[in-house]
Image (spheres, rainbow, N blue to C red):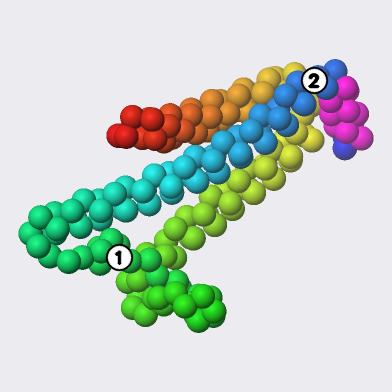
Amino acid sequence: MNETQKQLNREKRIKYKKGFLICDVLVVLCILANFGAVFLTGIMVGEEKYTAAKELVEIDKLNNITSTVNDYVKFYETNDIQADLNNWEQAHTIEEKTKSNNAFRAFLLNGFMWIFFVCCYILFRFNIYYEWHFYLLLFICIYLFILTASDFLNNYGLWLAKIIFGL
């Protein structure tokens, strides 16, 4: 039975060679679009915090209070060695370390999710025996590409609008 399955899979890979290539390209584009959306979201959140802090400084100037952006927004380094090497402020409390670690944890979780997805994709790709298996794989790849590309394009459009129109 195992040889028969391998033979069926080889036949489908030969018959739908371009379709498999399209699926491979879509998976790579999904990963790039997802990490691009995560990166753009990180940029926009950082800019919003900085802009809000600048507005608070302007309000303080009107009230004759001397302040800087760093009084309102503080960035901490959780790695003790990097903090010492670069003279950065080190995170001492658990709350400060947790804020920094949450972003890193989210990035790691996203990376593990994509590793799991790619492993499932490869496993499914080499276990296609019938035509409907191939069409299901193609549908899943197209659907995921639409989801991740729309997320990326929404974030990219918002980022461009903020730059162009000053939103």
Local packing at callout 1 (Cα closer than 10 Å; few below 14, some 14-19, many 20+) is few
Does residue 60 appear to the left or right of 111 in the view shown?
left
| Quarter assignment of residue 10 | top right
* Element assignment for label 1: helix
Q: Viewer-proximal residue, 96 or 13?
A: 96
Local packing at callout 2 (Cα closer than 10 Å; few below 14, some 14-19, many 20+) is few
Residue at 72%, 24% (x, y): give it: 22
Q: Viewer-proximal residue, 124 or 167?
A: 167
Residue 39 colored in magenta in the image: no
User: Is residue 81 positioned above or below 126 on the image?
Assistant: below
Q: Amino acid at mark 2?
A: Lys
| Quarter assignment of residue 101 | bottom left
Q: Amino acid at mark 1?
A: Asn
Q: Which residue in the protein does label 1 denote?
A: 70
Main SS of the magenta part reads helix
- Magenta residue span: 3-14
Q: Which residue in the protein does label 2 denote?
A: 18
Which mark is first along the chain, 2 or 1?
2
Residue 4 colored in magenta in the image: yes
Residue at 60%, 34% (x, y): give it: 30
